[in-house]
Image (cartoon, grey):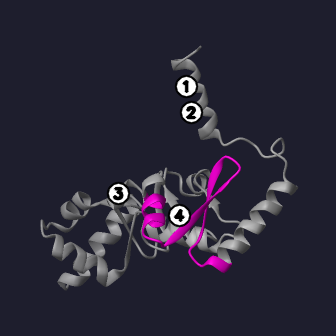
């Protein structure tokens, strides 16, 4: 058996047991401490890095079954066909007809993205506009951003606040505040 075939067999065994692995798992399975060797092997078979957990998890390209937005999750570990959290956030904002609020992004991605979207705004990759009591994150293209805001305003008129279910994470945050500061 060639070395490449041995590595492929080892990776297949590892990823049958778990769908996502840490670098230490890969080191142990492949029997090497060399990051260069590990990434050379992963590159040869194709892989994704998680957008959650600070990009610490890896999976083989053939494993994820991405949804229509290009997202896949395994045991709370998020992967995106778009790559990083930054790239995925930009994609979700750009493709959105009515822009995205932080809560909407958080719900789709399963994690808070404050720092990520703040840096994207600062770098001019996306824009934001205040709407009601939240910011809506929009395309950096002014014409598209205007269309997104127009759609947001129409959406808001069609769906009164009483019809929109509250974000469960917001409810939890409010309840924690009430518990900690009852007055």
Where is residue 132? Give x, y as percent: 71, 49
Q: Contact (CB < 8 A) between labels 3 and 1?
A: no
> Which residue appears at 33% of the width and 66% of the height?
13
Pick whichever of labels 3 and 1 is earlier in the sequence: 3
In the foreground, 64 or 170: 170
Q: Is residue 8 visible?
A: yes
Q: Quadrant of residue 36?
A: bottom left
**What quarter of the picture does the C terminus occupy?**
top right
Tag 4: Cα neighbours inside 10 Å, few (<14), some, or many (≥20)?
some
Q: Mark 4 highlights which residue?
A: 72
For marks 3 and 2, give the CA distance. Answer: 23 Å
> Which residue appears at 21% of the width and 73% of the height?
38
Tag 3: Cα neighbours inside 10 Å, few (<14), some, or many (≥20)?
few
Q: Nearer the viewer, mark 4 or mark 3?
A: 3
For marks 3 and 1, give the CA distance. Answer: 28 Å
Where is residue 144? Give x, y as percent: 67, 77
Pick whichever of labels 3 and 2 is earlier in the sequence: 3
Q: Mark 2 highlights which residue?
A: 173
For marks 2 and 1, give the CA distance. Answer: 6 Å
Give the number of the disc on residue 54. 3
Tag 2: Cα neighbours inside 10 Å, few (<14), some, or many (≥20)?
few
Residue segment shown in magenta? 116-143
Q: Secondary structure at mark 3?
A: helix
Q: Secondary structure at mark 4?
A: strand
For marks 1 and 4, give the CA distance. Answer: 32 Å
Where is residue 176? Give x, y as percent: 55, 26
Residue found at the very far left of the displayed protein? 33
Give the number of the disc on residue 177. 1
Q: Secondary structure at mark 2?
A: helix
- Note whether 178 is above or below 159 in the view shown: above
Q: Nearer the viewer, mark 3 or mark 2?
A: 2
């Amino acid at each position: 058996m060639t070395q490449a075939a041995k590595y492929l067999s080892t990776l297949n065994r590892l990823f049958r047991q778990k769908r996502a692995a840490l670098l230490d798992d890969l080191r142990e399975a492949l029997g090497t401490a060399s990051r260069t060797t590990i990434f050379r092997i992963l590159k040869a078979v194709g892989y994704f890095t998680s957008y959650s957990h600070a990009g610490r998890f890896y999976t083989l390209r053939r494993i994820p079954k991405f949804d229509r937005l290009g997202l896949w999750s395994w045991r709370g570990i998020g992967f995106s066909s778009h790559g990083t959290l930054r790239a995925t956030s930009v994609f979700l904002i750009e493709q959105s007809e009515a822009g995205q609020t932080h809560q909407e992004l958080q719900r789709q991605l399963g994690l808070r993205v404050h720092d990520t979207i703040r840096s994207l705004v600062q770098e001019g990759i996306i824009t934001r506009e205040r709407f009601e009591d939240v910011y809506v994150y929009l395309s950096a293209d002014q014409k598209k951003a205007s269309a997104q805001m127009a759609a947001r305003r129409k959406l808001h008129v069609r769906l009164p606040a009483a019809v929109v279910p509250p974000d469960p994470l917001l409810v939890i945050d409010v309840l924690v505040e009430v518990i900690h500061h009852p007055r």
